[in-house]
Amino acid sequence: MKTIEKIKNQIKNNPIIIYMKGTPEHPSCGFSAQAVKVLSSFGKRFAYIDVLKNSDIRTELPIYANWPTFPQLWVSGNLVGGCNIILELFKNGKLKKIINSVKENKS
């Protein structure tokens, strides 16, 4: 499977997904740590991809998303943004609305 197809499937199959450096338990950069802290505060399940262990995604996702940096938060198939946008949306209450609009899969 081509990398772009893999990315599209990950975004399609995960209502909330963050592409980050490291893992939610052990972020490998401060920006990823801040983004995951905010995202975790909502108590919703989310998927993550460690771009440090997936060099193909680290290379291709910025091209696909037209967004050069990580982390990248995707919700319901749409790019929300990186760390600064995540923090801004969190502070003004809009991120809560975005996250809460996602229906949890009960399977």
Image (spheres, helix red, strand yellow):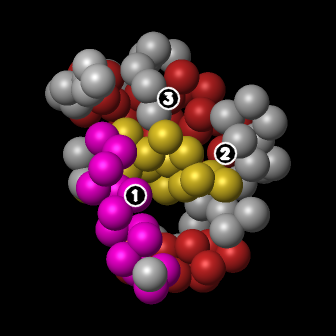
Label 1 crowd bin: few (<14), some (14–19), many (20+), radius 10 Å: some
Residue type, label 3:
Leu
Can you see residue 35? yes
Look at the numbered discs 3 and 2 and tell me whether their residues touch, using CB distance below 8 Å: no
In the rendered image, which quarter contains the C terminus? top left
Highlighted magenta segment, given as a residue range: 2-15
Q: Residue at horizontal 45%, vertical 14%? A: 43
Residue 39 shows which numbered tag? 3
Viewer-side label of 1, 2: 1
Q: Are marks 1 and 2 in contact (CB under 8 Å)?
A: no
Residue 8 lies, in percent from the top left, at 33, 68
Provide the residue designation for mark 1.
Answer: 10
Point out the tag, 1 or 3, that comes first from the N-terminus. 1
Residue holding disc 2: 32
- Secondary structure at badge 3 equals helix
Q: Main secondary structure of the magenta part?
A: helix
Q: Say above or below: 28 vs 54.
A: above
